[in-house]
């Protein structure tokens, strides 16, 4: 099956700092999403981004499908950004669209 | 209404118990999913329903039994679980099958 690796696995930031999270995938995909899982377990959909660049406030994401990676940028980080960030890719497998989550990046933003 | 709700939030059960998890959405989505997430791991897909029919079963043991009574509801019936089944169980929905979609807050299950 497809491999989805995220880096770095862990990241500690001072409040106000910027960061870039990376998602590499081993095969072509139809779609890609970024999620934030807060400390209580809730998964929040950040971006649905099969290609190109999108921005939403302090967050932006870029997917380069031909090179099989996606980046999530967090600017001016806040303590509420803490949690685990997952990318999830979608590709056709056995006649259906299968979603596979990446390994995750655990982010801690300290005051 | 743009959310997925799940009940209960927490569940503790013995290995001989029968319990059910419930998931509900009113966004008109036609695909609904169950995921299992162990601590410090990504979610793993268990089942997918598309238009109220089971489309995907990712080789899940029969002690987990999904049910989709209508387009807004998804249940997961649990019977004779093992302690290693303790995990966060997440429900999600999407417009059509395949898109990652919207997730519920999850049910934290502990099997004693």
Image (tube, rainbow, N blue to C red):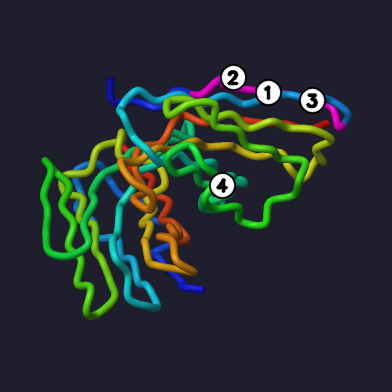
Q: Earlier in the sequence, mark 4 or mark 2?
A: 2
Query: Around disc 2, counting alpha carbons within 10 Å, would you say few (fewer than 14), some (14 to 19), or many (20 or more)?
Result: some
Q: Chain of mark 1?
A: B
Answer above or below: position of A63 versus A56. Answer: below
The answer for how far apart the CA atoms under marks 1 and 2 are is 7 Å
Q: CA distance from mark 3 to mark 2?
A: 14 Å
> Which of pointers 4 and 1 lies earlier in the amino acid sequence?
1
Q: Secondary structure at mark 4?
A: strand
Q: Are marks 3 and 4 in contact (CB under 8 Å)?
A: no
Residue A68 falls in image quadrant:
bottom left
Rendered position, A76 above or below B67: below
Q: Position of residue B61 (x, y in %)?
A: 74, 49
Query: Marks 3 and 1: in contact by CB < 8 Å?
Result: no
Q: Earlier in the sequence, mark 3 or mark 2?
A: 2
Q: Is residue A94 magenta?
A: no
User: In front: B78, or A11?
Assistant: B78
| SS label for mark 2 | loop
Q: Cα distance, mark 1 to mark 3?
A: 11 Å
Q: Which residues are magenta?
A: B6-15
Label 3 to label 4: alpha-carbon separation:
19 Å
| x and y, in percent, of residue B65 in the image | 69, 38
Helix, strand or loop at mark 1? strand
Image mark for residue B18: 3
Contact? badges 1 and 2 (CB < 8 Å):
yes
Q: Which residue is mark 4?
A: B47
Marker disc for residue B11 = 1
Question: Mark 2 belongs to which subunit?
Answer: B
Determine whether the residue tagged by mark 3 lies in a helix, strand or loop.
Answer: strand
């Amino acid at each position: 099956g497809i491999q989805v690796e995220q880096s770095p696995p862990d990241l500690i930031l001072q409040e106000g700092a910027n960061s870039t999270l990376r998602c590499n995938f081993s095969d072509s995909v139809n779609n890609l999403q970024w999620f934030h899982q807060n400390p209580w377990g809730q998964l929040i959909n950040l971006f649905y981004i099969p290609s190109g660049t999108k921005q939403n406030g302090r967050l932006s994401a870029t997917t380069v499908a031909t090179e099989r990676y996606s980046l999530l940028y967090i600017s001016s980080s806040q303590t509420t950004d803490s949690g685990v960030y997952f990318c999830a890719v979608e590709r056709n497998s056995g006649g259906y669209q299968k979603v596979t989550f990446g390994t995750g990046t655990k982010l801690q933003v300290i005051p | 209404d743009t959310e997925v709700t799940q009940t209960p939030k927490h569940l503790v059960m013995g290995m001989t118990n029968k319990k059910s998890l419930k998931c509900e959405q009113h966004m008109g989505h036609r695909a609904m999913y169950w995921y299992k997430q162990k601590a410090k791991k990504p979610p793993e897909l268990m089942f997918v329903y598309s238009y109220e029919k089971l489309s995907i079963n990712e080789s899940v043991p029969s002690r987990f039994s999904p049910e989709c009574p209508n387009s807004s509801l998804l249940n997961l019936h649990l019977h004779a679980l093992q302690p290693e089944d303790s995990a966060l169980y997440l429900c999600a929905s999407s417009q059509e099958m395949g898109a990652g979609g919207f997730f519920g807050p999850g049910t934290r299950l502990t099997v004693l």
